[in-house]
Image: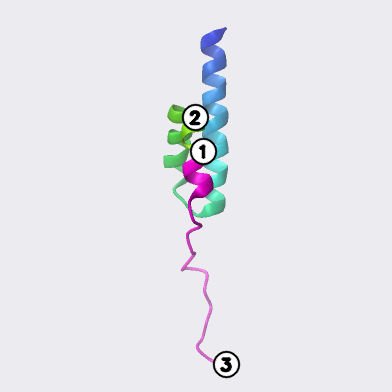
């Protein structure tokens, strides 16, 4: 039962960091793995990290 609980908690942290990484523009797969293996120790790094800017969604034509 203890091993199952550890695996479920690891998956929970993996999914949580995957979600947060998507909202901040980070690599979601990397942060899932970090959450799975490091759990709560990886959480402050993604919470305190700055949001990446999206460069592909700009439609600025340069006209004012």
Give the distance between the C-alpha atoms of the residues marked 1 and 2, in whole angstroms. 7 Å
Q: Mark 2 falls on what kind of element?
A: helix
In the picture provided, is 15 more to the left or to the right than 36? Answer: right
Q: Quadrant of the C terminus?
A: bottom right
Q: Identify residue for label 3.
A: 64
- Asked if residue 21 can be seen in this view, the reply is no
- Asked if residue 23 can be seen in this view, the reply is yes
Kindly identify the residue that appears in the image at 46 percent across and 43 percent down: 45
Q: Are marks 1 and 2 in contact (CB under 8 Å)?
A: yes
- Residue count near mark 3 (Cα–Cα under 10 Å), binned few <14, some 14–19, many ≥20: few
Q: Identify residue for label 1.
A: 43
Q: Which residues are magenta?
A: 43-64
Q: Which is nearer the N-term, disc 3 or disc 2?
A: 2
Picture coordinates of residue 10 (x, y %)?
52, 25
Q: Nearer the viewer, residue 10 or 56?
A: 10
Picture coordinates of residue 57 (x, y %)?
52, 69
Q: Is residue 60 magenta?
A: yes
Kindly identify the residue that appears in the image at 56 percent across and 23 percent down: 9
Kindly identify the residue that appears in the image at 57 percent across and 15 percent down: 5
């Amino acid at each position: 039962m203890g091993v199952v609980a550890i695996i479920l908690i690891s998956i929970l942290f993996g999914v949580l960091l995957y979600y947060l990484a998507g909202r901040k523009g980070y690599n979601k797969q990397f942060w899932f793995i970090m959450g799975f293996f490091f759990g709560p120790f990886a959480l402050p790094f993604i919470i305190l990290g700055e949001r990446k800017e999206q460069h592909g969604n700009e439609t600025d034509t340069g006209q004012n």
